[in-house]
Image (spheres, rainbow, N blue to C red):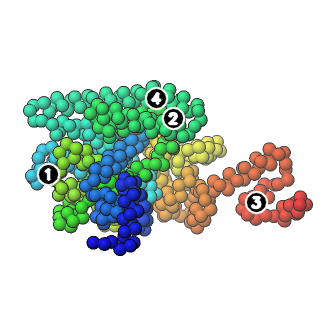
Amino acid sequence: MTLPPDASALAATTSTVTPFFGMLALVLVLAVFVSLAVVKLRQSLLVGYFLSGVLIANSGVLALVGVNTDDPMIANLGELGVILLMFTLGLEFSLAELRHLWRAALIGGGVQVALTASIATAGARFAGLAWPEAIVLSVAIALSSTAVAMKSFQEIGQPNNPGARVALGVALFQDILVILFILLLPAIYGSNDGSTIGQIVWALAKGTLFLAAAILLGRHGNTILLHAVARTRSRELFTLTVIGTCAAVALAGEALDLSLALGAFAAGLVLSESIYSHRILSDILPFKDLFLTIFFVSVGLMIDLRELFAEWRFVLIGTIAILSVKGAIVFGITRLLRLPLRPALLTTASLASTGEFSLVLLRKADGFQPFTPAVEQLLLACTAITMGLVPSLMRGTGPFGRWLEKHGFRSRPARPPQGLAPSASIRGISDHAIICGYGPVGRSLNTALRTCDVPTLVLELNAQTVRELKQIGQAVLFADAAHSEALDLAGVERARFVAFTFPAVNITLAALPLIREKNPGIQIFARAKFQAEVEQLRAHDVHVIQDERESAIAMIESAMGAYQRADLSHTEVLGIVDGKESPPLRESAARSR
């Protein structure tokens, strides 16, 4: 068969393209266009990356660059994605955060994983899966998408919501679990000759020693190398050292039969324990989205649409079962932890899906004993669909929560952390100022008001800060100002004014209707970064302090002081900043010309 001229030219061109580079180019270009469409539908970008892989694998475009759907390069791309994902997990892993969230992590995460995995194991065994496959599958279903959940909390303007804190605690527990479970995979798929317990003990001991050595290396040994590199003042060399450390530690993990994935996680721990961790985060984490792109596209490349269409009923049943069973378990746990109704619903929606580490486990398990194509395709599809539904489910919890409250479902009052309950003095406070956030601005405002004998009450979500304030006798609540229950505890109906001392306009806007409903005449002060945000807040009768405007005023007056000039009064400086040049300024400019 003779190809048309255009097709012949294309074939001649693509035949000279390196297959791996051609595949990577397809991945990145299609990810852009598919993700643009996904964003228009207000879905997570991670879903767009996954769909990009599905489109590439099932449209035949891989043949243009000389790659087949079963080519080992696709598996290698997926392995690279897993390594990069585990590295960023280790880099961001925070033992300090875990200490603050231990209750949500240990109780919430432990109960959630145990119940979900037990139900999933029973279902897998009923479906005829062997014990190893049933165990791996049940743990994969018990995991949730940390990346989608945390990003969705940010997108809806609720990063400090109590539900987000509980979700983060559960996610940290799941992160620890998946690391331990990867260690146990060889034992789970090992022989049944009575040595399984010994294999498990040996795997745990070896992995624990490896991670402990990584932490010690990060605190002591690697710091010396980073010191030497930092003294060169070369950003390129510093970044190269970070990537080199990741590769070396990951290779060490593989050499010890602990897998490249665990080695990459340990590499992240090594660097996170360094005094340069913040610089490393700023240099490396911008690449995190690229890492996630590679991983999720590589998973999408494994999807066979023909297999899914043939088994669409099982995909639908599996998706509904995961969302409903996990959702019911998570909601019960949030109520056990005494979260109010709406934060509980947010947490439920954020954790009801399976997640990226479900896919990591599936990929790692394939190295020991592959699942049947039907089971593998089912889990891949259910993971993609449930993750894609998370942002929409989270946005729907607000209206659903209000509907439940309207129909008599009462929100259980939150139980403050031990030692942080509101005291009698807080319950009796009146004509006071409510200060939301205790950063540098909140601290200064609080000091000034107390110096003038104005009663103040602080709302803060940092537990350590709350404890310190209680020790010095400051009225303080561990609460989120964007929630009705917190405002009731703070006595907003008796307060003179509320000050939002952080420039998170989305949180301020979420709290405004609640505050106005309880105290229509209260004065509200807020910070904003940009002029559009200023106008948005002023439309709600808020007194706004614009960071950029105040910085410009201070900069001009400081510059005039540096030149020992007093040509501009404060009023004229304000005119310059606001774009309203006064006549004296124009006359002065004319004289200078």
Numbered disc 3: secondary structure: helix
Question: How many residues crowd mark 4 within 10 Å: few (<14), some (14–19), many (20+)?
Answer: some
Q: Can you identify the residue that label 4 sits on?
A: 222
Q: 377 or 144, which is in the foreground?
A: 377
Residue for point 40% across, 49% down: 291
Where in the figure is residue 395, as x and y percent of width and height?
38, 63
> In which quadrant will I find the N terminus?
bottom left
Measure the C-alpha gap from mark 2 to mark 1.
46 Å
Q: Residues within 10 Å of mark 2 (few under 14, many from 20)?
A: some
Crowd around label 1: few <14 · some 14–19 · many ≥20 (10 Å)? some
Q: Find disc 1 in the rendering and name its residue.
A: 124
Q: Are marks 4 and 1 in contact (CB under 8 Å)?
A: no
Alpha-carbon span between mark 3 and mark 2: 41 Å
Residue holding disc 3:
576
> Which of marks 1 and 4 precedes in the sequence?
1
Separation of marks 2 and 4 at Cα, in angstroms: 11 Å
Q: Nearer the viewer, residue 473 or 12?
A: 12
* Residue 105 pos. (x, y %): 32, 42
Amino acid at the residue labelled 3: Ile
The residue mark sitting in front, 4 or 1, is 4
